[in-house]
Amino acid sequence: MDLQLHRHLGISYYVFPGASHNRFEHCLGVGHLARMMAQHLQKSQPSLGIKDKHIRCVELAGLCHDLGHGPWSHVWDGHFIPIALPNHPKWSHEKASEMMFDDMVKQHDLRISPEEVETVKALISGKKERCKLGRTMPFLFEIVANDRNGIDVDKFDYIARDCHSVGEKRNISMTRLIHSARVIDARAIEYMVIDVLLIAQKYMKFAEYIDIPEKYLHLTDDLLNRINMTESKELAPARKIISRIQKRDLYRRIDHKIIDWDLKGVCQAHITPESIVHAAKHADLPGVDQGVVAELTVDHVIVDVSTMHYGRGGVNPVSQVMFYSKYNPNVCLQAEKEDISLLMPEKFGEVLMQVYTKEEKFMGLVQAAYRHVFKSLPIPDDQSEIATIAVITPPVTEAPSTPRILTRLPGLGVPSTQPSRSFVRTPSLSENKFTTLPPNYQSRSPSTIASRSLKRSREASVELDIDNPPPTRKSMRIAAAVGSTK
């Protein structure tokens, strides 16, 4: 599969132009690191019985673990396919990687036994119970895709590679990386690309290729260009959205909030485009324009729920890691909190709720309706006694590539330079005071201002006196030269 045409960070390329590295490079790196890890275990612990054929399988798994990625990586399998093919059996790029690996072995008549094929596919999935080797060497299945605690060479490679591409130092620690991460508006472009794909899917039917290796092989990031080159009237709306992406006339994020991990289900169930539009049309929202209210539909609103965690959801991943002492290297134990640090963070995951609108004129209205729904969230009884909840909105800071000075989180043992604030309250969830808009607000973005200015300039040019056009720079210079000779 031509992984050179799949950008590793997908839509993030529109925000970080330097992030142009592809899946091919990443897979080479993972294969290399997987081999190094397996060889290290082989040499340092001969009693494990690791043979060269086992190392080859691990390396192949690293090389082929991303064969199944579609255009724009996780945008394809995480957002587009579930909408385009809602009745399709649960599909993922990992399953597609196995399908493409099977096809590659068949098409190229590779010298690999059926047992090794199944081993490689099991190593890609991280499911040791799927093959015989998993019963004797389960540790090999945590090298490429660690299903137990998430620590694997896949992450080792892409963290270093992604940091390098977006301008972060390569030797940044994992903890520093997580705490300096920030959410950017590449999400808006993702939803625009998804809309383009959904429109084109009705006529081009490329979603069905996920089960046909010889066709799926040719689905790469250039799909957007192929759609844009069409001339059919049916795809005109898709081409219009592509034009908006190119002009940076993006969908507008009108609000966002960080909420507690345990409230993720409540928010997903109650904060939806349907509930927001219903509130806009039926709730008592002061200051809204009823004409704009009448035009608003569910299709104009996007609700995005993103999660950020340490690799195991809301669970401390260190609790799933076994440690050994240099005095007794053949015995492993779980570490107690007191053995590591009492300054470990209390929360290991958070949820970011973001709301977008596709049209600027709905920005104020959608925010007012969203906040009405947000305030009325039903809080579960077991959440009513929570004393402190993470509702701090990310402050306006420098770009991610600029390191913050002395900024450390409490979990790292060094106080933050910013004063700490504790929100002792039940989780009724307050509004984000940094994003508040008037209910009748309409954006004054640079693209909108420019288009209006262009329109005014065109109207003004129509009113010019044709018989007496305004002087050009050249005519003014000639006139000045003539005047100076008199």
Image: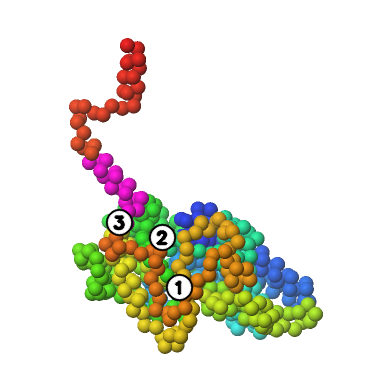
Q: Could you tell me which secondary element the residue under label 3 belongs to?
A: helix
Tell which circle, 3 or 2, labels the residue nearer the N-terminal end. 2
Q: Is residue 119 above or below residue 171?
A: below
- Residue 212 sits inside the magenta stretch: no
Three-letter code for the amino acid on which mark 2 is drawn: Ile
Question: Which residue is at a point 60% across and 68% down the rendered structure image?
Answer: 415
Question: Which residue is at a point 41% across and 57% down the rendered structure image?
Answer: 224
Q: Which residue carries the number 3 mark?
A: 236
Q: Is residue 418 left or right of residue 56?
A: left
Residue 277: x %, y % from top left: 28, 71
Tell which circle, 2 or 1, labels the residue nearer the N-terminal end. 2
Tell which circle, 3 or 1, labels the residue nearer the N-terminal end. 3
Q: Could you tell me which secondary element the residue under label 2 belongs to?
A: helix
Q: Could you tell me which secondary element the residue under label 1 belongs to?
A: loop
Residues drawn in magenta: 443-459
Between 160 and 260, which is closer to the camera in this rendering? 260
Q: Are marks 2 and 1 in contact (CB under 8 Å)?
A: no
- Residue 456 sits inside the magenta stretch: yes
Between 15 and 198, which is closer to the camera in this rendering? 15
Q: Are marks 3 and 1 in contact (CB under 8 Å)?
A: no
Three-letter code for the amino acid on which mark 1 is drawn: Val
